[in-house]
Amino acid sequence: MPRQVRIFWVWALVFAFLLVGCSGETDSGSGEDQNGQEQETTAGETVKLTITSWRTEDTEAYNRIIEEFNKEYPHIEVEFRPQKNTEYNTLLNTALQSGSAADIIQLRPYQAGMQLADAGYLEPLDSIIALQDFPPEILEAATASDGKIYGVPLSINSAQIYYNTRLFDEYGLEEPKTWDELLDVAETLQQKGIIPFAIGSMEGWILSLTHAVLGPAFYAGNDFVEDILSGDKDFTSEEFVASIEAMKELAKYFPDNYVGLSGDDMRTLFVTEQAGMYVMGSFELEVITQLNPDLEFDFFPTPPASGGEATITTWVDGSYGVNADSPHKQEALTFIEFMTSEQFGTLFANELKRISAVPNVQTDDPMVQKMADLAAENSTPYMILVYFNEGNPTTKQELEAALQGMYLDELTPEEVADKVQQSVNTWFEPNKE
């Protein structure tokens, strides 16, 4: 079965693991590196490791997780040292090139992260025994072109439309079941002086994520993805252009000066109840709750534009890998092994309110469970991230830049679609069977 098609079934496999479970057995550090070479360590010596990430908002949670790790490994001090999301890639590449990168590196999912492995910056992790328990469809998000695994996947993400339940109740609104009902909700909120959607276009990744959530309402989710992958359709097709047009038409419900708003600005509008809806990933759940514990909110899947089922968008999120030039590779691999354990998966799920990629880990958070249940019923992949994040610049980057151009009135939706297809033409070969 082709790689692209197999990933469609990632959620089914994840839930099979949640229901059935598997051993999840881990192998503690052996004192040898991945090539079987003894590394010099001194008994009783404290080793300091650094972890780099683009998730500054996760610092407190990781500090608590590290405290649990240190109960078994007190001689390994670990510092979680995140950097601003929008600067992460540049700073990481500079640090890798200068030999000053952290010992453990958070990797973007799929090709964006695996480019670092292809360049020789990462240590292969295939000898980590517990990784054998992860579904191969999940590991593919951290597998490089040489077929080796270079990261421990962290979580299964979903993206959906969060909404303020207090405002919905106050104005007699219900979760929309169709796209037209969604527009009616937006219209009512706007008439009441509430910003319907907390959206800004300053950061490109937000636009590709928003399109991944809203677009399936117009291009019919998985069927269209299969047609694109097989070459039966391309990105200039009527339904894909319609999905871009919908993004443009929705702009009248965005905040004033939305072209200058960042992800932080969007989040602030939602948690301070200035905006009624917020298109975002499951990774924001813990942050929203932390910023405003009293906020009354829920979420709904994207309602269809013309029949069909509401959809929720899913993908395997980033992973953690080991810097191939780390002076403390053995200790870094010990922490990486900890990340494959059920203990870490449970800590991750509870501290960060996300679905762990570690098999057999349960969550007791009702909203996370609701996301998981809906995803199991009718999910669609984050198409541009999972399948079209290659090229130079990547097709995902081309889409993001083109959408920003559209919101600046520099491009039409048809021109956005054309630019995406032009990028795809430079590297993608359809899976003809």
Image (cartoon, rainbow, N blue to C red):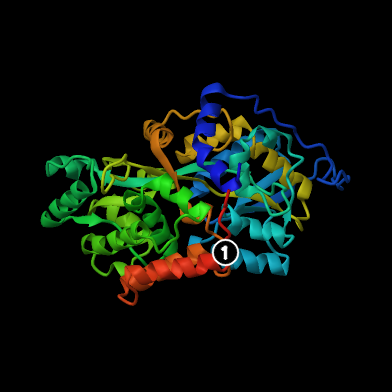
Task: Tell me what residue is drawn at x 42 percent, y 50 percent.
Answer: 224
Question: Does any portion of residue 55 appear in the rendered image?
Answer: no
Residue 376 position within the rendered picture, expressed as x and y whole percent measured from the top left:
43, 33
Task: Tell me what residue is drawn at x 67 percent, y 60 percent.
Answer: 116
**Furthest-front residue in this view:** 433
* Mark 1 neighbour density, 10 Å: few (under 14) some (14–19) many (20 or more): some
Q: Nearer the viewer, residue 19 or 63?
A: 19
Question: Does any portion of residue 295 appear in the rendered image?
Answer: yes
Q: Nearer the viewer, residue 75 or 344?
A: 344
Q: Nearer the viewer, residue 353 or 235?
A: 235
In the rendered structure, the answer to whether residue 124 lies left or right of residue 11 reads: right
Residue 361 position within the rendered picture, expressed as x and y whole percent measured from the top left:
54, 29
Task: Tell me what residue is drawn at x 71 percent, y 59 percent.
Answer: 118
Residue 248: name its quadrant.
bottom left
Residue 311 position within the rendered picture, expressed as x and y whole percent measured from the top left:
36, 42
Residue denoted by label 1: 89
